[in-house]
Image: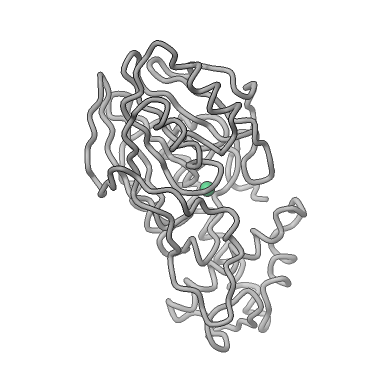
Amino acid sequence: MADDIPFDKTLELAPDSVREPVPGLRVVMANNPGPFTFKGTMSYILGRGRVAIVDPGPDDPAHTAALLDAVRGETVTHIFVTHTHRDHSPAAPRIKAATGATVYAEGPHRAARALHIGEHNPLDASADREFAPDVALKDGEVVTGDNWTVEAVTTPGHTANHMAFAWKEAHALFAGDHVMAWATSIVAPPDGAMSDYMASLAKLAKRSEQIYLPGHGPAITDAPRFVSYYILHRKAREASILHRLGKGESDIPAIVRAIYIGIDPRLTGAAGLSVLAHMEDLVTRGLVETDGEPSISGVYRLR
Ligand SMILES: [Zn+2]
């Protein structure tokens, strides 16, 4: 999809087995591979004895059992949820019921903007609308556990309620789906917003964490460099769209065909929504215009 980012697609990890990639951190990957999830959702276990679980994962009894098995004899005190996509949050109530842990997140699922008249939300099925945290965290809030400290870092863009968690002792960040080593993040309106996403990337670029522990795929061990690649990638996408519109007005399917060369056909819809996310941002910034609200079926031209 993008050869400008040095992606790392090496991941030898059996689903629902326990690994310890960093001392004091275990990972159990859910068995939900796919075009949007890579080999599966990463559920992390932070600490030993009295632990936190980051992203309990999908509604999959086998995965919940594997996670509970991994912490047998220990106490789960906290559950952190990065965002409310169905591959990350639905197991939270089960883990909470089994352990009595408190659930922390930014908030329930919400869209980045209201639906336009006549618009349907293409992402409805991917959202976990049942989720509600016990504790809604604000940006910069610090949660302290047994030998670990976590800082909430709001990172809207992939979803409006996306929150990363900085693990202070390890100079690491649970990055959710905001920055991943294996692929770019999907930013799809109305749940996601490109202006928010870019602002969140700029915010991460100013932070000092070296290691990112993403929601899918391997850890990122040179996080600042990787974030700068992500920013350059988005700016290059934007430049490609503007270049294309410089040749004349166009619609989103034509732009996807022109700039997403060799894309996995299963990702064409997501690519279209990503272009729509760019169009919303470009229209807001006065660089591009369309008739009415920016939509997936709209025709776009340079302003
Ligand atoms: Zn997601």
The residue lying furthest to the bottom in this view is: 291
Above or below residue 219? Residue 264 is below
Above or below residue 240? Residue 143 is above
Q: Residue at x 57, y 67 (%)?
A: 121
Nearer to us in this view, 160 or 198: 160
Indicate the position of residue 51 as horizontal and vertical percent values: 34, 21
Nearer to us in this view, 220 or 269: 269
Q: Residue at x 34, y 34 (%)?
A: 209
Above or below residue 165? Residue 234 is below
**289 left or right, relative to 138:** right
Q: How many marks?
A: 0
Indicate the position of residue 61 as horizontal and vertical percent values: 58, 30
Indicate the position of residue 65 as horizontal and vertical percent values: 54, 23
**157 left or right, relative to 120:** left
Q: Residue at x 25, y 20 (%)?
A: 146
Above or below residue 171? Residue 18 is above
The residue lying furthest to the top in this view is: 73
Nearer to us in this view, 140 or 260: 140
Q: Residue at x 44, y 77 (%)?
A: 284
Image quadrant in which you'd find residue 76: top left
Indicate the position of residue 291 as horizontal and vertical percent values: 57, 89
Q: How is the image coloured?
A: one colour
